[in-house]
């Protein structure tokens, strides 16, 4: 196993979750639609798991949770489903510049279907500009979709303020909560959020399972049509082992998030302090304090992010340049560009993300190896000024 520091791309399934899931692959495999006793067992556990996920965000009713195949599908159901449902009211949707690629591509799709999409700008730290959001709202606006935090630079967004604005204007508010799901609690009793996308793997449950929270009274049209499961909003035989795992993961996360987030914060701050102090011309991307506890995102002058990842790979350290979902494109990150970085600056990034299995020794390994790797790459780059190479690191 490597020194794994890429937890925002994928997380291991917690052993306790896996154990809970196994019987539902073996003896408890029945379909909840079946009328026999085995079907009843499946129905009961589906209800129980839905309740656990509802409790995770303090949703009053288990029926507010629609299980999906992951956050991508939840985002599709939220945006396309709401667009189809409310198009007679208006055809304008607002997203932000720093959304996950799935939101950007859904918005592009809706644009082709005749909807108008506006994108809220962010400041230099990757935090959305509330003044700009207010200005974009028109009588035609039906939905605002803004993530809880940047999945790349880790900047936490002013969700409470956004929800106040959308509430005042009587506009639906959707948030993709995946980036902060494992580290910042959501309480829908306190915040007027209408739709929330969640992912099971983000909280150490299995991949391929997610959920969309729909506040009571909020309607969306289905985008997957079939046998009418999930209140007709997401047809297809339920993934019982998957939702059991998601439920168990939510239950554990409810208990352990607070202590875990504190542990991450200590390791993250040690890493940031060390990197910025020991490596010349290194910078932290995103907000210095309003950031996800498990995220550190750096930029190094005269370095290509991809070469850095390969350099780390030689030392068995797994990290990323940016969002895993767009890591194989050569385009610079849309988030970094929207924060005002130049293309060459946006290319020199390193995303380090911590998780439940991260140990302090993983961070220490990175702290030990990174300065040497950066220095070696800089020596090979014709762009590096000689005085940088002379600096001790
Ligand atoms: N939204 C965000 C912010 C993400 O980081 C991801 C990927 N983890 C997704 C959506 C898509 O999730 P999934 O791969 O579960 O569909």
Image (cartoon, grey):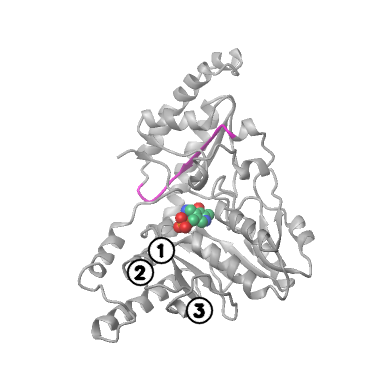
User: Is disc 1 placed on a helix, strand or loop?
Assistant: loop
Is the residue at mark 3 in contact range of ligand 1, meaning its CB lies under 8 Å from it?
A: no
Give the distance between the C-alpha atoms of the residues marked 2 and 1, in whole angstroms: 8 Å
Mark in front: 1 vs 3: 1
Q: Nearer the viewer, residue 97 or 376?
A: 97
Callout 2: few (<14), some (14-19), or many (20+) C-alpha neighbours within 10 Å?
A: some
Query: Is residue 68 visible to us here?
Result: yes
Residue 80 occupies quadrant: bottom right
Q: State the separation of the CA atoms marked 2 and 3.
A: 23 Å
Which mark's residue is nearer the viewer, 2 or 3?
Answer: 2
**Residue for point 41% across, 41% down:** 5
Q: Pinpoint residue 258: horizontal percent, then vertical percent.
A: 45, 58
Q: Which residues are magenta?
A: 347-357
Of the numbered discs in the image, which one, if any, rests on residue 239? 2
Residue denoted by label 1: 209
The answer to whether 110 is drawn above or below residue 4 in the figure is: below
Where residue 182 sits in the image (x, y, percent)?
46, 57
Which of the pair 336/259 is nearer the observer?
336
């Amino acid at each position: 196993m490597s020194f794994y520091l890429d937890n925002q791309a994928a997380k291991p399934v917690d052993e306790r979750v896996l154990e809970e899931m196994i019987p539902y692959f073996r003896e408890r495999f029945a379909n909840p639609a079946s009328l026999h006793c085995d079907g009843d067992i499946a129905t009961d556990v589906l209800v129980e798991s839905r309740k656990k996920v509802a409790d995770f965000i303090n949703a009053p009713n288990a029926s507010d949770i629609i299980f999906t195949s992951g956050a991508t599908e939840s985002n599709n159901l939220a945006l396309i489903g709401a667009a189809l449902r409310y198009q007679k009211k208006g055809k304008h949707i607002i997203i932000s510049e720093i959304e996950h690629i799935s939101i950007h591509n859904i918005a592009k799709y809706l644009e082709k279907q005749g909807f108008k999409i506006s994108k809220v700008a962010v400041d230099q730290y990757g935090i959305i500009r509330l003044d700009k959001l207010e200005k974009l709202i028109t009588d035609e606006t039906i939905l605002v979709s803004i993530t809880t935090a940047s999945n790349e630079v880790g900047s936490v967004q002013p969700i409470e303020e956004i929800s106040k604005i959308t509430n005042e204007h009587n506009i639906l508010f959707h948030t993709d909560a995946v980036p902060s799901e494992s580290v910042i609690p959501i309480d829908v009793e306190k915040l007027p959020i209408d739709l929330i996308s969640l992912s099971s793997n983000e909280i150490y449950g299995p991949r391929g399972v997610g959920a969309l929270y729909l506040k009571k009274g909020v309607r969306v049209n289905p985008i997957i049509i079939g046998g009418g499961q999930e209140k007709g909003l997401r047809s297809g035989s339920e993934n019982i082992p998957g939702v059991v795992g998601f439920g168990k993961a939510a239950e554990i996360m409810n208990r352990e998030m607070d202590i875990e987030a504190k542990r991450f914060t200590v390791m993250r701050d040690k890493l940031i302090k060390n990197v910025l102090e020991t490596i010349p011309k290194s910078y932290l991307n995103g907000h210095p304090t309003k950031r996800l506890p498990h995220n550190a995102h750096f930029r190094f002058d005269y370095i290509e992010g991809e070469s850095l990842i390969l350099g780390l790979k030689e030392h068995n350290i797994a990290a990323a340049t940016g969002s895993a979902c767009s890591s194989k494109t050569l385009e610079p990150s849309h988030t970094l560009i929207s924060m005002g970085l130049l293309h060459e600056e946006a290319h020199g990034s390193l995303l380090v993300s911590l998780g439940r299995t991260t140990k302090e020794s993983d961070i220490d390994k990175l702290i030990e190896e990174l300065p040497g790797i950066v220095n070696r790459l800089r020596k090979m780059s014709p762009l590096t000024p000689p005085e940088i190479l002379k600096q001790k690191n």
